[in-house]
Amino acid sequence: MTLDPSQLWARLVDAVWKTDTAALSGARAAWLNFARTLWVVLRDMREGDLNLRAMSLVYTTILSLVPLLAVSFSVLKGFGVHEQLEVTLSTFLEPLGEKGTEISGRIIDFVSNVKAGVLGSVGLALLIWTVVSLMQKIEHAFNFIWHVPEERPFAQRFSGYLSVILIGPVLIFSSAGLTATLAGTSVIAMLAEIEPFGALLKLAGTVLPYLLIVGAFTFIYVFMPNTRVNVLSALVGALVAGLAWHLTGWVFASFVAGSAKYTAIYSAFAALIVFMLWLYVGWLVLLVGAAIAFYHQHPEHRTVARGRTRLGARLMERIGLAVAAVIAGEWRAGRPPPGSDALARRLGLPGSQVEPSLDVLCRAGIIIAAGDNESAGWLPARPPDAVTLAGLLRVLRADGGDDEQRLNAQPAADSVIEEAERAAITALEGRTLADLAAETAPAPGAELHRLEPGRDQGSG
């Protein structure tokens, strides 16, 4: 019996999404989680969000590349390691073949001709602003992937960007120069002639570029989003992105080697077009790695359908009651205040579906942030035994809107709602948030503070 494509697809969906990972061994569960992560990342790519962000970054990069390298060149020149700039740029453009060498030479010529004295204070300020704009664009892309709506304060963004721009190149190129110097020493040359040290050094020379890429990607994934990123999740995304970087570089080099007819068609524009394509591939790989890091840290977002669904009124009420009960329960038990991420994991929901209830409860004075910001966790703003369930339910149903307006033309509708309200108040009479918290206490071993301590973040 032959299955049609729709049946095969349905079986694949069932195998990936309806299998209980708790019933699998560690290795099989890890592979299934990886398959789910790959599934949602490919879905995001198919929907076009990552592709559009990558294309937007290509445009910004072309405008900002020479100013960025000019600033880096000036800093590197002060430390005496500016010679490594051309070597590193050539390595980055290596998949472009001869066109990469040509583009690298032209960029270095442009950078060398940029003189701060000629630009003046206004020109230098515009130069730095162009570089900062590129960093801001990158942060916007990462915040989108991590579902973070808020940006860093301007002063924090500016100081952080300048730190990366001024200190980052020095560390990167200094390490590259140190590696090249060590590789050229007589001791390394002597060890290379002795086995198995020769094979090990050859292997290290092959693996080291990959490790440097992984280290750079990990730093970017931790630093750029305006949220607290688990280093392990960033490393997982960087490992996959680093491997994809080298594979796409090999594929792109093969494409460039066989694109003689495109050169004939586009003539002088061929090098620019190939350069833009390589920038697009590079940014897409970087963003895909960021998406993998996000889904690794937030498995609740790994769903077969898009997680950003519109919540119904009854589900909003249930989420609000559950959130208030969990926060009160953790406070009564003397445990650390849970953050938004921990609450989302406890309820098995994406953070984007928990945050509206947190906002309503906070505005109503039911809960309060434990520190200067929501990432510190949430505490009851009032004693739980002083918050009635009837009042809490009324707060969730009102949701900050006009809940008292009457419909003059339809008094019967008003009377039905009032009757339902009276019935709810009667049913909940005498019950408080403390009672609900006691009824929803977590099972042993499921306490929130055991879930990635110190990683609670109010960004979903």
Image (spheres, rainbow, N blue to C red):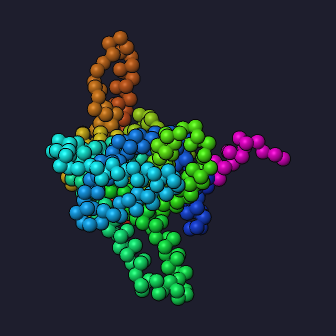
316 and 342: which one is in front? Answer: 342
Extreme residue toward the right, this view: 1
- Asked which quadrant contains residue 364, the reply is top left
Location of residue 83 in the rendering, given as x and y in whole percent from the top left corner = 33, 64
Residue shown at the point (28%, 50%) measured from the top left:
113
Magenta stretch encompasses residue 348: no
Location of residue 433 in the rendering, given as x and y in whole percent from the top left corner = 30, 48
Residue shown at the point (44%, 58%) measured from the top left:
90
Location of residue 119 in the rendering, given as x and y in whole percent from the top left corner = 20, 44
Q: Kindly report the secondary structure that dominates the magenta region of the rendered protein.
A: helix
In this rendering, would 145 be left or right of 82?
right
- Asked which quadrant contains residue 133, the reply is top left
Residue shown at the point (73%, 42%) measured from the top left:
5
165 and 284: which one is in front? Answer: 165
Residue shown at the point (35%, 60%) measured from the top left:
85
In this rendering, would 34 be left or right of 437?
right
Say whether residue 186 is visible. yes
430 and 85: which one is in front? Answer: 85
Location of residue 129 in the rendering, given as x and y in whole percent from the top left corner = 24, 44
Say whether residue 351 is visible. no
Magenta stretch encompasses residue 5: yes
**Residue 177 higher or lower than 35, as above or below:** below
- Range drawn in magenta: 1-15
**Residue 378 higher or lower than 55, as above or below:** below
- Asked which quadrant contains residue 57, the reply is top left
